[in-house]
Image (cartoon, rainbow, N blue to C red):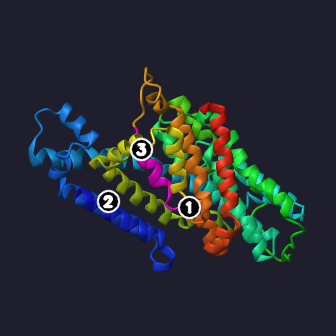
Amino acid sequence: MFILMVVIFVLGYLAIALEHPLKVDKAASALIIGTLCWVAYIIGAEEILQMGLSPAWAKFTAANPDAHGIHAIREFIVESEIIHHIGEIGEILFFLLGAMTIVEVVDQHEGFKVITDRIRTTNKVKLLWVVSFLTFFMSALLDNLTTTIVMVALLRKLIDDRPTRWFFASMVVLAANAGGAWSPIGDVTTIMLWIGGQVTTLKIIEGVFLPSLVCMVVPLAVLSFTMKGNVTRPIVSENEEEITTAKERLLMLVLGVSGLLFVPVFKTITHLPPFMGMLLSLGVIWVISEIMHKDKPSNIKKQLKVIEILRRVDVPTVLFFLGILSAVAALQSAGHLSLLSQYLDEKLHNIFLIDIAIGVLSSVVDNVPLVAGAMGMYPIAEMGVDPYLNNFVQDGLFWEFLAYTAGTGGSMLIIGSAAGVAAMGLEKIDFIWYLKKISWLALIGYLAGAAVYFIMFGL
């Protein structure tokens, strides 16, 4: 059963990677492997736990010396492990759900037009730099997935030519992933590390901002010498009815961004989980929205009500994370990740090489389970006399560099990140086209940023 759990996980991953050819949504595959891994675990639990690879079982038996037999094993898996892991997963999912809803509310109120209407240039190089830097900082405030969706919608208003728009959308993916890597709320992986206590807000910004910036600027600098000409803007209909006023758009943009920025402050002051701060922000924005539109015509009010906007939130993405994180939790509990960490330590025993390997892997498979796996493989250490283990303390080099590599490494393939998958779906970007035109740019940016981090801290 120990090996069967790995087989289930690998087959599920293949189904997720081949989502488009199979025409089966990755959320469905993730939910199946998330359940089947636990089923295989509990069926073969006696044999699996006797292997002595599960740190969680060792802690359980140490705390409960009288626990033995199949009843104790089932109590450990059902009442201890599943409850513990579902609590950790729930924190991430509620945080994401709240954040995605806030951004949808701002978008439906056309709050992002306040920013996009100020972009005037048609020069390709200038526009590329403007769009990339805008994406870089928006991604840090919102998240890379949402920012990519917003920026691709913006590009449709700025660029009429599809091949040119593909190029810009691909650079948005690079910038969004780089921007999300240095912010505790910019990427699912950094959210996981932040909520898990591996990194803190100010330290991750201080340590990862410059490498992330270099990761984006190096490809931009290369393109500045090769890209020529101007973009052609699409013809805009002047008959489109606006459902919000300029003041309402600005107010909702300010409320949305302020609500997201409030979350780290909430956590610092109250020491409560970040998802509670996010839900508080959503609740306040919801109330203000209801009051703002109470006297409007019913047809407009219906479009702007949060209860209607909630229907457009990307629930399959939330379910995908639930399934994949559940599967990783099963592998962590059974001891697979502990075994993998021992292998990496024996073969590499270098935090920079381990993190770079995880970053490269994240271009092939999703970075969420890779980071979840690393969090399961390497518990947060206490500062001691061993220099190697000191890299795994809170805000240690391993965790900071992991935030960078896992966040930016996925840009090397279009399917390597949630932002890339979103851009691919929205613009129908061809996988081979991206591989030929963008992957090498993403690679040199990734390695340049990694080199900067190593110079800053590794030496």
Q: Which mark is residue 319?
A: none
Q: Are marks 3 and 1 in contact (CB under 8 Å)?
A: no
Q: How far apart are marks 1 and 2 (CA)?
A: 21 Å
In the image, is residue 24 above or below residue 378? below
Residue 434 in picture, x, y percent from top left: 66, 69
Horizontal placement of 391 versus 237: left or right?
A: left
Q: How far apart are marks 3 and 2 (CA)?
A: 21 Å
Q: Which amino acid does label 2 sit on?
A: Val
| Earlier sequence position, callout 3 versus callout 1 | 3
Residue 426 in picture, x, y percent from top left: 64, 72
Q: Residue at x 18, y 36 (%)?
A: 61
Which quarter of the figure has residue 150? Answer: bottom right
Q: Does the magenta stretch include residue 367?
A: yes
Q: Which structural element holds mark 3?
A: helix
Residue 385 in picture, x, y percent from top left: 43, 20
Which quarter of the figure has residue 453? Answer: top right
| Earlier sequence position, callout 3 versus callout 2 | 2
Q: Residue at x 26, y 59 (%)?
A: 3
Which residue is under mark 3? 347
Q: In which quarter of the image is the C terminus?
A: top right
Residue 114 in picture, x, y percent from top left: 80, 56
Along the line of sight, the residue nearer the viewer: 216 or 187: 216
Q: Which residue is drawn at 61% across and 46% down?
A: 181
Which residue is under mark 2? 6
Which residue is under mark 1? 416
Residue range corresponding to the magenta coloring: 364-378
Within-10-Å neighbours for mark 3: few <14, some 14–19, many 20+ = few
